Amino acid sequence: VIIVAVVLGVTLRKETETNQFQSVFLSRCETFKGNNCQKIWETFQQAYVNRDPCKVPMEAYDPLVTAAPFKPTCNRVMFWSKTKVVVHEFTEKTDCFVTLEDTLLGYVLDGLTWCGKEGSSETFTTDCPVWTDCENNTVSSFWKRVSAAYADIACGNVSAMLNGSIAVPFSPTSIFGSIEVKGLNATRVNSLTVVLVTEEENVTNCTDASLKVLQKELPAGINYGCEEVPESQLQECGSDPQRPCGSCW
Ligand code: N1C
């Protein structure tokens, strides 16, 4: 009886882990109208279920990107690196900019952890490998794949919020540096404006060496600009929803 109870208990616990994750996935997905969320969920799962969580390449999510495609977005795309809280505080308040987390796939998976296991059809949300454990892990490969898709649909003038309070605001190994910058399509994108968010104690400014590296990495034909914007100015700017887009810096 004890063995049966333990086996049953473990099975039930696993089922709830999958079910809990699935219900978060589906309820977040349903907030975007006009999508087949059940189909998107099934396509998503196929990327990692029954696989070694360290052997999920970014291509595993290709069918997902096909099932939930990104729409071309001109002049509103906002990338970011090491500014997750500030950028979303800002974009939440104005309709001028769209981050990946404002799109269906970015919104659904933001802040979540998931992985599969060989020989199992479950989704696990604990003990999943992270970047430092292995490069091709379930979660990093997802962000790399959707970031590539997001860069690919960017058009016109794009922006990137970087952190002026750290020594190296542009890192070529970040997702922004390694995937998004290189993935911009010069036939569609005119310019990239770096919004370097500064605080009272500025560590860097627009003349920073790492930003020279960024300019070099930018595909030929895309113009570059940089604005130093104090965090207080961002907050002020975001608090006035009537303010015209593009007047914040
Ligand atoms: O590696 P980063 O930043 O440069 O990646 C940020 C960059 C943004 O422009 C987004 O479009 O890549 C996209 N992106 C996300 O939208 C995202 N949401 C949550 C990348 N990563 C994202 N995450 C998680 O934060 C994910 O787990 C990843 O590893 C971090 C990236 O943080 P970063 O180093 O500040």
Image: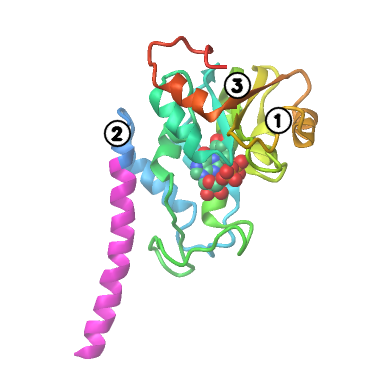
Dot 2 or dot 1: first in sequence order is 2
| Disc 1: which residue | 205
Query: Which residues are the magenta region?
Result: 1-27
Mark 3 or mark 1, which is nearer to you?
Answer: 1
Mark 2 or mark 1, which is nearer to you?
Answer: 1
Circle 2/circle 1 CB separation < 8 Å: no
Q: Give me the residue at 45% from left, 36% from top.
A: 101
Task: State the separation of the CA atoms marked 2 and 1.
Answer: 39 Å
Res 158 label: 3
Residue 184 coordinates in the image, percent (x, y): 66, 27
Position of 111 with respect to 203 (left or right) is left
Q: Residue furthest left?
A: 1
Dot 3 or dot 1: first in sequence order is 3
Mark 3 or mark 2, which is nearer to you?
Answer: 3
Is label 2's Cβ within 8 Å of ligand 1?
no
Magenta stretch contains residue 11: yes
